[in-house]
Every structure is written in C-alpha cells, then in structure tokens.
Image (spheres, coloured by chain):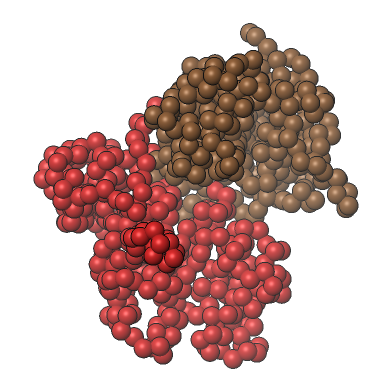
Chain colours: A red, B brown
Amino acid sequence: MSPELTKAKPGSGPGLAILQVEGLSKDFDVSRPWLNRVIEGAPRQLLRAVDGVSFTINRGETLSLVGESGCGKSTVARLICGLYAPTSGRIVFEGADLATLGANEMLAMRRRFQMIFQDPYASLNPRWRVSKIVAEPVRSHNLIAAGPQLDKRVGELLSDVGLSPLDGEKYPHEFSGGQRQRISIARALSSNPEFLVCDEPTSALDVSVQAQILNLMRDLQREHGLTYLFISHNLAVVSHISTRVGVMYLGRIVEIADTKTLFRRPLHPYTQMLQSAIPDISMSGKARTPVAGEVPNPLNPPTGCTFHPRCPHVKDKCREARPEAMEFDGAKVACHGIHDGWIPIRVAA
Amino acid sequence: MTAPLLQVRNLRVEFNTRRGSLTAIDDVSFDIAQGEVLGVVGESGAGKSLTGMAIIGLLEPPGRVAAGEILLEGERIDNLSPEAMRRIRGRRIGAIFQDPLTSLNPLYTIGRQIVETIQTHLAMSHDEARKRAIALLAEVGIPAPERRIDHYPHQFSGGMRQRVVIALALCANPKLIIADEPTTALDVSIQAQIITLLKKLCRENGTAVMLVTHDMGVKAAFNLSLLLITHDLGVIAETADRVAVMYAGRIVEIGPVQDVIHDPQHPYTVGLMGSIPAVGQETERLPQIEGSMPRLNAIPAGCPFNPRCPRAFDRCRVERPQLAPAGKSRAACWLHVEEQNRGQTPVLMR
C-alpha cells in the first residue's frame, strides 16, 4: 500500500494512544422474571451485546464505529463513558485501567471525557436555563465557583459553538434541533475534556443542519485538540468525519482500517455489502445490487462467523470457527475468506 | 399524451390558531403521470408530509385545504365528503407511512388486516381475499407467506413489517401510492431491499407513486405512480423520475431527478446538495447553508429563502418568485428571471 493511504488526516496529533479497549464484552440479562424461571423452568438468558471488542484511539484522531441497529455500537460508547460496567475486558484511558480506579480518581478522570447524545430533545433538561445546562459539568467538578467568572466561561462556550452568549438566559424549547445539539456540545466542552464520545450526534438532524454540526465538530477538534469516538450508522457521514473506521456486526468489530483504505478497498463481505447499500446520489437511476437477509437474532447468534448466513462467499470453515481479527495489508479484518484468500479483493476506482 | 393521473393546482393548507392562521403549504402545484415516481424532498417543516396528507384527505384539524384543487384522473377529490373520500383511500390511492409498527394493528394477525382491507374495497369472498393476501405477501417478498399470514406484527422484523405495510397499500390495486418516508426507520441494508421492492412493484403494476422522503437516494421504483416523500436525497436519486424540492411550504424547484441533482438551479437546492457528505469525497469542510428554516409565523417576505441565500438581491426581499423554466428544470428564483432578461444563464453550480 502506498504511504499516503496510511497517512493521518490533517488535524490529528502525534500517534499516542489516548484510549485502549481490550477484549471488551457486555452481557445483558434478558431472562424471564424469577417466578417464571422457578415455575416454568425457563433458563437464564444472556444477550451478548458487545463481544470481545478491541481497538485503540490515538490522540487527536476520530475513530468511528459504524453498523446497523443492534450491532452494539452505542453499548460500546456507554461502556467507555462508564454508563454500563463491562462484563469482561479492559478500558485503559491514558495508561490507567478504569476498572481499577478509586472513586476520587475516577471523578478526576471523568472530567477528561464527555459524551454527546443522539437526541437533542431528550438530552437537555427542559426546566433549566441554557446557562445552567452548560455549566453543569463545571459545577459538578468544582472547576469554577459560581459568579461572574463562570458566567463569562459559559458565554465563551456558547460563542465557541456558534450561539450568542445572551442565549444562556433562554430555555431549550426556544431552540431548533441543530441549536440544541450546539448546546449539548457546549456542555460537553465545559469541563475542558480531551476526549468526546459522540453517539449519533447528527442522526436526528436535517442534512443542512448536519453539515453545520459536522463542520463545527471539525473546527472544535482543531482548536481544542480533541479526540473523538464517533458512533454512527451513516457511512457517508463517517467517511467525512473520521480518521479511522471500525465496522461492527452483532457485537463484534469485523473490520477496522483508516478511512481511505476502508472505503477504497472494503475487505470484509459485510463492509462491502454496507457500501453497496448506500443510496448514491451521483449514480441516479442505476440498478442497485440487492442485499440479502437481515441481522439475525442476537439471543441466538449463528455459530462461527456471525455473518455467514448472509455471506455470498460462505464456506464450511465459516460455520464452524469464529474468525479472529488479524492484520491484512493495513487493515484489521475478521474473515476466514480474506485470510485464506478465497474472497477476491475489490479496489474501487 | 394522456392526462396526468394526479394534478395538484395551487394547493394552500392553513392552520387556524388562536393567534391567526398559519400557512403551511402555499401555492403548490404539480402533476404525477401514470407510472411515474415523483419524489418530494425537503427538510423538517418544509411541508412535504402535509402535501401527502392533503392529497389523501387526512389533514388533522385545525389543518385545512384553504385554496386550490386536487384532481385524480381529472376528477376533483379535495371537496368530497369524508365517506366518498374513504372509498377512494385504499382503493385508488394507497399510502405507506414511516413507522411500520404504528401502521399495523398489534392485536390482529396481518392476514386479518389484509383480508379486511381487500374485502372493504373489492367484492371478494373471505377465501378469495385470503388467497389474494397470500399472493400479495409473496409479491412483496415475505418468505413462506401461507404460514406467515397468521402471524402478528410483533413477530416480524422492521423490514418485514414494512413489506407487510406495502402489501396492505397494494391490496386494492391503487393507481397511486403515497409513500411518506418509507425507509427512514430502517437500516441501510433493509432500506436497499425496500427500494428494490418498490421499484419492482412500480414497474410491474403501473402504479404512480408519490415518494415523500428526506433521502435523495430512494426514489426510482414503480409503474405504479408513486409520490415519495423523504428528507433523504440519496433515496430520491435512486428511485424517482422527477423530484420536487420544498422549502417553507413552497416548491422551489421541480424537474427530472438527474438534472436537479447534477445541475441544481435554485440556490437552496445547490446548498442542500452540497451539504450532503458523500463517500470518497475528500473535503475538509462541507459547504453549509447558514441559519435554519423560518418558522411558519415568520416566513420572510418575497422569496422565503432570501435571508439565507448567498445570491439574494433587492427583488428577492420584496417580490415572491414563481416557478419558471431554469435549465432543464423549473425553479422559483429571481436570478433566473433577471439573467434571462439579460440573455444569460446563471451559473449556480458549486
């Protein structure tokens, strides 16, 4: 591969890992209630939402996780933010394993990463003024005492995200969806974090507003040296914003590579399928290759490679053995067909 | 040339509120020909879904058609009684809505819902209707329809449910289908399957479809006429023959889908096309339209887009532009009028 393919996009800093995730798994208990289990003898049932996910995010880059509903991408985001406790695996932020930290150390660590949620209507308290919403992380971390200094800081944050400092006096309902998402971003930035987890930040927005928010996120990344973990189901948005992309399917990362490589040369059959499913504006009128099948029930995932029932290149090995993610020419991919060489590699023009 | 299947003439929809009436749709006109797919695209609040609702007579009060007329096969349908309209809905105009879970009754098997719809509109015995229901389910690509017909909606996945909703819309062989964001609630691979299905049905049945979508990708599928309503330009590009771009309750541009996408004539369409990220396109920043769509009670005078328009001049702030030929499409923009007066064509592309 030519060197310019692996070169990071502008805006990324030195390649130092800020976050490492190793073998992360999360099971949800979806058993029937205790009484049913006792009377009907129904077994305990676990749903494995995230299954052995590993990746590294370097300082200043944007790693995107992309996949269809139910693939576990939002669960990964919540695990990293500490909203769920992992069933197994490690999350290492700047060299410190989050599971081993005490409450005080964890609180100090919390200041350094923040989250932006999908729905700007549900993630802002409708009874609070914007200034109170934006200052909440500052207050809970005791960074600046209430007073003119805090007001000034809130004003700066609002200007940073393209709102007026005077908007602090208003309530969330007075803003449109895009403006509300700007408020969410201002709130996330108020504790001076280094790392932002963005869970579908533009999915609820119209395209023209989405463009405004994506541009804003890029500008802020450059100005504040931020690192993003970006969760999305929209491949076009992902290709625009990310440095590297991980594709998830049924709780596993099936392929991870830098953005240019992934979109120019998708390796895993699922990545190829997702790409051919994007409605393409420029190819208007062209017949699309139909994509077969649906995501299987995660309570009863297929054996071996979980993608095998939908895969056009399936062989017996795929039904039996789970493929491990291995290096392949600049990408990491979990597919027997790629590593054993029976799947042809397509490079887009 | 035969008369258009559906004609909408100067449609105006108003909402009476305590603070006066709001105009949600203002002077909208378009035609849909037999077997044509017309995509309607626009951002939230542009009035695209309301246009579809006005056509099938399902406007919720206080919304009402305040002016204009709607003609189906040359016959006015906007002033019919609720009972007469009920007979047209489902029989001659079918509808597909965004969320397949809320369009199906969770307490009845899908077979019962489809058979009921068939018997409401066609003179068929229960057994004949059931046979037709199974055939319809097979046509929309539901595996083992003989067995699946007795299942309840919750036993189907999202994509399969949307197929059932499409089968329901097809029950009485309507000439026109209004599809309001039919793929928005679905994953991208399922969306692709539904688009392929819609296209196949249009081709085979000769139905017109009004596809209402925010996704420019979906629109190219039926000989059924289809009115496709969506916010997704990608959906439209894939599915539609023609596309109408709506802004603040008005059509700002309408034309063949290829021309509107590759050579947009209205500054709003140019901005909208530019703001969509595309795979493989390497831009540091997306071109963005500043500001947001005006609220209904504060639509600016003249062209409603003028405060956000990079090319606005004095006339745009005073006088409202009408749709006029622009390139291969029609656009409501004074730039074209001014330039044509000077014998030039404006260059609008990015």
Q: Residue furthest left?
A: A340
Q: Is residue B281 visible?
A: no
Q: How many marks?
A: 0
Can you say which quadrant of the picture contains the C terminus of chain A? Answer: top left
> Where A201 sits versus B91, above or below?
below
Quarter location, residue B331: top right
Q: Name the side, left or right, on which B57 lies relative to A219.
A: right
> Where B209 sits versus B74, above or below?
below
* Rendered location of residue A100, percent (x, y): 30, 84
> Where A215 sits versus B312, above or below?
below
Residue at left 52%, top 47%? B275
Q: Residue furthest front?
A: A39
* Rendered location of residue B84, percent (x, y): 78, 23
* Rendered location of residue B202, percent (x, y): 51, 21
Residue at left 64%, top 47%? B44
Q: Is residue B126 visible?
A: yes
* Rendered location of residue A24, percent (x, y): 29, 67
Q: Name the side, left or right, on which A149 lies relative to A17.
A: right
Residue at left 44%, top 72%? A83
Quarter location, residue A22: bottom left
- In front: B136, or A233? B136
Residue at left 81%, top 24%? B80
- In front: B108, or B342? B108
Q: Name the side, left or right, on which A23 lies relative to A35.
A: left
